[in-house]
Image (spheres, grey):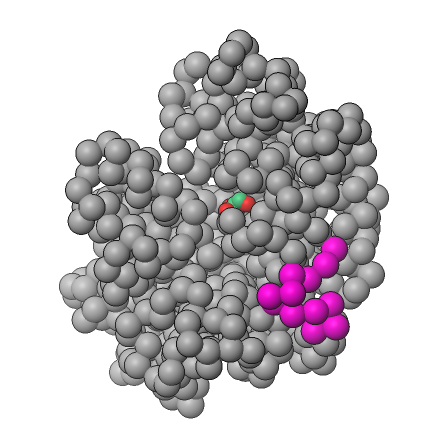
Amino acid sequence: MNANFHKSTVYQIYPKSFRDTTGSGVGDLNGVTEKLDYIAGLGVDYIWLTPFFPSPQVDNGYDVADYCDVDPRFGTMADLERLIAEAGRRGIGLMLDMVFNHTSDEHIWFQKALQGEQKYLDYYLFRPGKGPGLPPNDWDNTVAPGSAWEYVPHLDLWYLHLYDKKQPDLNWDNPAVREELKNVIRFWMGKGIRGFRFDVLNQTSKAEGLPDDGENPGKNGKRFYTDGPHIHEYIQDLVRDTGLDKLVTVGEMASTSLAHCQRYSNPKNKELSMVFSFHHMKADYRENSKWKLMPFSMRYLKDTLTEWQLGMQEAGAWNAVFWCNHDQPRVVSRYGDDGKYWAESAKMLAMAKQLLRGTPYIYQGEELGMTNVKNYDDISDFNDTETLQNYDALIRAGSTPAEALEVMHQRSRDNARTPMQWNGGRNAGFSDGEHPWLKVNANYETINAARQVDDPDSILAFYRALVALRKEYDVISDGSFEPYLHEREDVFAYFRRLGGKTLLVVCNFYGAETEVPAPEAGAEYRLLLANYADTPADRFPARLRPYEAVAYWVE
Ligand code: GLC
């Protein structure tokens, strides 16, 4: 199979932080249109736009109040149609973000449910409590410590919300709900949308009877709603009835398993083109907790990436490969070095990811080496609901404000959401207004697009080269993955092979030189790409310099 999306690269845009054309301080759809030439310059095939639908913005648009409209703060439907058309002219398709596990509590369906209309009560998961003040079961909320249930006094019922209490979960077991969601997809397909990303899709099917968990304090319930009993059936149904299989689709799969992802993205099952899994983004979680700091473990990172590369390949399934998105702190600050070896490590991480088996995703600013924020001096500088709730939880558990702030400097989702750094001017060129909705990262004068766009040695230029190579060489888009030097804890190395061609990728993940053996003594090595200017073109170097990354043809 040589599916088109194997050669594609997706560029993810968080419109709120991309480009503000009105001076409101909030990015907008016209801002995306304005920057299309920059995006096209990267060579990407799709833009995944995170939600711009009408929303109270409790979770920055992942709390959707109307799936088929544009929030006025981001523009109009006409702006969106122009963006679709202008992107299309440049050969770029738009992928929209479908947040179908939950709606906003301000969605008309939930409002009608609150008015006691039975039809809409059945759209959500309303249940009686176990007794006065006692929720229906012991499931924990996924955002912050506490129950996943909220009590509605005038109904004397509780409703389930795995996320914020303003994000009630939909009842996917109700066929009427699934029909409504199919209509949303049909609506957007009618507008010329070319793909979809499905938010936390694998949490939509809940175990029958919503049983108590009891065994996983802090994570109670997870096993009852992760890759739940009807999930494959529901996805197949959604795809079949909408014709989604003609588009590119990616499911966000939270805390999922390899076995399920092998099924979600196996073309034979007619579910999704590909899946996001997150295990490799937990290499710096101590005790598997996002809020406990630890330098990243290379052993864990390599084991996880390798297991997923091999496992998905064996099953004929397909990964979406990524380091960054709007929920992840910046990778150069996590698995790279955002100080001395900033450019080298940003390029190394680019190569390590972009040449893997799977469809690569680039999150806005990643191609410039944007870093975590250091200039948020007070918790009031942060906006993200998850950040604010967990800051409070850390303080309640005994952390000092300084300690809790340090955790957020490393783990807050706002690290990814700071305004895009276009240039060294006012608000980094993000907005001409007085107040960007989120503070600009202080390093915008050195890290910005204007400085890199014409520089052939820039991180941006390196990304462009990698995107183009995937289009040029089938061995990159469709070759097999085979680990090399798996036992080593300083380099990540792999072969890609197809039809007698072999590409070798070796990435030094540390700021120290290291020796690396050439895999085949008699072979000839021809350089394809490296992140240092003077890497030998026709022999494999015996030593890799700090954060050096090389890709050689082995002949
Ligand atoms: C996904 C989104 C995240 C959001 C959550 C709830 O994980 O990427 O931003 O908060 O779902 O919708």
Q: Nearer the viewer, residue 107 or 320?
A: 107
Q: How many numbered marks are there?
A: 0
Say which quarter of the image contains residue 462. Answer: bottom left
Residue 197 seen in the current view: no
User: Is 338 left, or right, of 482 in this rendering?
Assistant: left
User: Is 86 left, or right, of 314 in this rendering?
Assistant: right
Q: Position of residue 311 (x, y in %)?
A: 51, 41
Q: Position of residue 17 (x, y in %)?
A: 48, 67
Taking the spot 19% from the left edge, 71% from the top edge, the residue there is: 340
Q: Nearer the viewer, residue 258 or 218?
A: 218
Which image quarter holds the N terminus?
bottom right
Taking the spot 43% from the left edge, 70% from the top edge, the residue there is: 436
Q: List the single residue furthest toward the top.
A: 131
Type of secondary structure dominating the magenta stretch = loop
Residue 404 falls inside the magenta stretch: no
The residue stretch that appears in magenta? 68-79
Q: Nearer the viewer, residue 496 or 74?
A: 74
